[in-house]
Image (cartoon, rainbow, N blue to C red):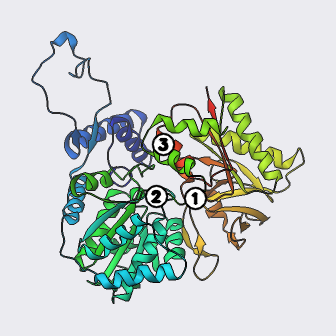
Amino acid sequence: MEQSRSTWQLWHVRAEAQRQVRTIDLPVDQSNRLVDLLVFEVLQHRSVALKAPPDGIEEPDALRRADGSSVYAIAGADRYTSHRILDAEQRILTAAGRHDGAAVNPSAVELALLEMAANGTALDAGQAVLVRQMCTSGARLQLAIAPAGAGKTTAMRALTLAWTQDGGQVIGLAASAAAAAVLAEHTGIRTDTLAKLTWGIEHGELPDWAGQIDRRTLVIIDEAGMADTLSLDTAVQYAIGRGASVRLIGDDQQLAAIGAGGILRDIKHTHGALHLSELHRFTDPAEAAASLALRDGDPRALGFYLDHRRVHVGDLAQATDDVFTAWVADRAAGLDAIMLAPTRNLVADLNRRARDHRLGGTSPGQGVELSDGSRASVGDVIITRSNDRRLRLSATDWVKNGDRWTITHIGSYGDLNVRHNLSQLVVRLPADYVRASTGLGYATTIHAAQGVSADTMHGLLTGQEPRQQLYTMLRFPPDRRGISYKE
């Protein structure tokens, strides 16, 4: 449970226990009994209950269930965590309170800002303040909150320039390979994934760059809100243990990893955070303001999207049709369009419609089954769902989670030759990878879309989604989007 989420409920534990027990050849009655024993052990002896202390009021027996719980308590609603996760959160918070790290000479910071401006990239006031603070604070662990489109990569490039020109080195980490690649592209620093570092620490096989971390090293962890607590703690403790300083960049209002546990909000509440608030992604200032208001949960933000006919209201069937029709129009115009939906069932329906439309009633010829249960043939767009460094596109790039491809050839054993939709580079996906880590790529869930690139987006909402899902959906390129909303 600790490896996949920071908190859990009875249902999560029971489901995991059933998955574990299914690997053992036991009679059904013994399997059920073993699951019950595992659930009891995990919740009663291995977990920490996250609930308010008792108020001293005892319900009479008539108001208690057979298991002794109050009828006023929602069965299975209690949340739990573990001492290991709580300890990891405390270590991260403690690190954020330390100010004994390296600092850059202020004159080097100002020179870096001037150099950026001379090269045509002048930072706004908020970006400049962030760079100055991150360079000169001496904080061992510091957090910056950066909404989508706030120019964080520009600020990180200036931060890198100042730190390296003062004699230090900068290394970048990210929760996903896609985010690490973007950070490397915009800053020119060596980047990798958190998983690569934590795996190396646990197995004693550290990558070369990890062994070079010292007191003059700055480790930037991008999209920190997408990192699980244990991995983040492992990376932070390793870096600080070698004398380095760490800077977390993230957005506490975006969709977070299940295992994240809200650590960014904890750091912000306890030690404060730097903020970027001026958006650069949008050409329309009104849309920039609406995006920030939406991020903060202000319902008035919806007025912008309604006024600009970005939202189309109907029942679920009509809304689904609207999304698909808009996607078809964009594809006909030569755009790389993608559809987003909140559930896997809706995504599967949209992917099926898209493939049927592409085929136009013709026979697809040779096909292959993907890991999401769908079939694909030459010409279909697919999405890869796991990083594999062995599948190289170039000397510096490989197959990553969230990459979208077009199938160009199907091998006799189910392997695929595919072309990347953005870079146009080609690679061969082995059959076992295809079966385990691919799906149709015309539509995807909102959560899985983080890190996905496309020209246009058309999204479907049912009305049950939190604002973080809508905010994530609207982070796609402006002015070419539409949202269909089930009334």
Three-letter amino acid code at disc 2? Glu
> Which SS class for mark 2?
loop
Distance between the alpha carbons at the discs numbered 3 and 2: 15 Å
First in sequence: mark 2 or mark 1? 2
Q: Residue 294: which disc?
A: 3
Above/below status of 291 relative to 150: above
* Residue 262 left/right relative to 449: left
| Closer to viewer: mark 1 or mark 3 | 3
At 35% from the left edge and 75% from the top edge, which residue is drawn?
219
Q: Which mark is residue 385?
A: 1
Callout count? 3
**Where residue 29 sits in the image (x, y, percent)?**
38, 32
Q: Crowdedness of circle 2 by 10 Å Cα count: few (<14), some, many (20+)?
A: some
Q: Disc 1 to disc 3, how far (Cα)?
A: 29 Å
The residue drawn where x is 18% and y is 33% is: 52
Q: Which residue is mark 2?
A: 278
Tag nearer the camera, 3 or 2:
2
Q: Residues within 10 Å of mark 3 (few under 14, many from 20)?
A: many
Q: Quadrant of residue 416?
A: bottom right
Give residue 311's quadrant in the image.
Answer: top right
Q: Is residue 161 visible?
A: no
Could one spot residue 268 in this view of the protein?
A: yes
The kind of residue tagged 1 is Arg
